[in-house]
Amino acid sequence: MTGRFLSLKDKEYKDFASRLNQVNEKLNAFNFIDENEKNGKIISVKDNICVKGMPATASSKILQGYVPGFNATAIERLENAGFSVIGKTNMDEFGFGSFGLNSEHPAKNPFNEEYVTGGSSSGSAVSTALIKEHVSVAESTGGSISAPASFCGIVGLTPTYGVISRYGLIDYASSLDKIGFMGKSADNIREVMEKTVGNDPKDTTSLSATISNKKPNKLYVIDNLMAGVNDGIKDRFEGLLTKLSEKDYKIEHIKIDYLEYSVPAYYILSMSEASTNLAKYQGFKYGFKVKDFSLNYNEFFMSARKQFGKEAKRRVILGTFIRSKSIKQKYYEKALAIRHAIIARMNKILKEGFIIMPSMPIFTPKISEVKDISPVEAYSMDMLTVPPNLCGFPHMSFPYFYEKGMPLGAQIITDHFNDYSLLDFLSEWESNFKYKFKEEIS
Ligand code: GLN
């Protein structure tokens, strides 16, 4: 399947880049826009994925000045297939966030600037909404593709864990991190995905599986998860189920035990992994360098780690605590057990059908409504996006409704390695649904 992408030569590209720069001043979709000529189908890349010769900061001050001299495997494969990267997209620092606000200059929602974009792949969602025929290569650990896709009215596909190499991805939590895609058409996402999947000797967790597209005709709704969803969202989601049941899908309501523990289990595991992954930022090697060698040991590392934002500091401290020997059985090992229990239960269900749910439990909030909520309240917003991520199941958020001009997304989940069934579902959906995009740059 081939998609349609913008392909701009020489002067055309320069004009495009200057229009993009103008819009970017308002919306902060990009941390970096490449002004050099491009020859190829253009894509953008989240700022935690390495593109040779372009800055990679993961929106962190500690990585300021880091310019990798190599491509992530996914990018290398895309460049070899004729794609060109136009820039690096804004995000929550290191992927820590659900609203896009954990960045020094948060991206703004293209539908209405007072609203959040969702996170952590905030800029990838905004650039996808803004640019004609665009795909952005993004990343999800616990929902960073679905959440912003939902709030920005585009499609976000998170593949099965391991089918796309993580080589060149700046780690957040290695057992959960997945490179994925944001786009506006099934054909475009499929083309980019087909070019990136497959085993990579540089990432020992990457797999060379055959990806199928088995279509189930059952859609499961998980009632114990829906209990935490805002009533208005429940109502719009019912409308979606009615539409889908008219299209030969059989809807079944079920309960899956332990799902209510998925958010705490996810945060325990992801913070533990993040705290070790962030240990490499010491002020020597990447980005920010401490130059004063007269400092003592503590002062030296403190002056480097001071560069971390508030949420990154919180996760390093909590993650380090959770991993400590005396308490690891109390939290870490329990969280692992929960993860396995949920995988086993969801696995069974997904052999029989798709699981469907809203992508987020709330309507897109205004920036002012969430900027001061507590971390625990913010984490609880991931209740729907965390379960498939915790289990490595492929899932996709797609827009299905507009509420007072703002988009709403729903998420479908399928079995491991059945990723292409999600894109087939999307192709069907596209023939019934009219997307609205605020502004398209071409
Ligand atoms: N909101 C989640 C978190 O903060 C997910 C982030 C992600 O998927 N990178 O951990």
Image (tube, rainbow, N blue to C red):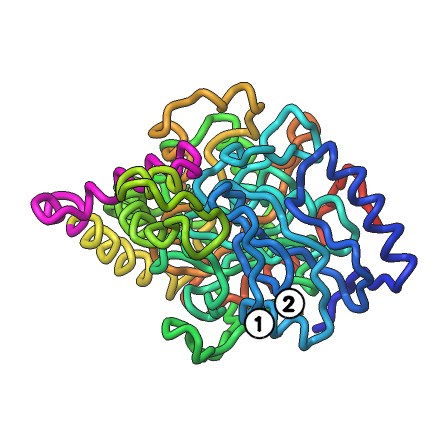
Image spot of residue 59 (x, y percent) = 54, 43
Within 10 Å of disc 2 (Cα), the crowding (few <14, some 14-19, many 20+) is many
On screen, residue 19 versus residue 414, left or right, reads right
Residue 314 falls in image quadrant: top left
User: Closest to the observer: 307 or 193?
Assistant: 307
**Where 155 falls versus 103 (above or below)?**
below
Disc 2, SS: helix
Residue 17 percent across, percent down from the top left = 81, 50
Query: x, y percentage for residue 217?
Result: 50, 61
For label 2, the residue is 192
- The magenta stretch spans residue 185: no
Q: Residue at x 54, y 54 (%)?
A: 66
**Amino acid beneath label 1:** Thr
Labelled pair 1, 2 in contact (Cβ < 8 Å): yes
Please tell me whether mark 1 sits on a helix, a strand or a loop.
helix
- Image region (quadrant) for ligand 1: top left
Residue 74 seen: yes
- Tell whether 428 sits left or right of 253: right
**Marks 1 and 2, how far apart in space?**
7 Å
Give whichever of 9, 374 is nearer the camera. 9
Position of residue 140 in the picture relative to residue 435 (left or right): left
Check mark 1 vs ligand 1: CB closer than 8 Å? yes or no: no
Disc 1: which residue:
196
Amino acid type indicated by mark 2: Val
For the point 54% across and 67% down, the residue is: 72
Q: Tell me where the magenta segment starts and ends, as one range.
A: 306-333
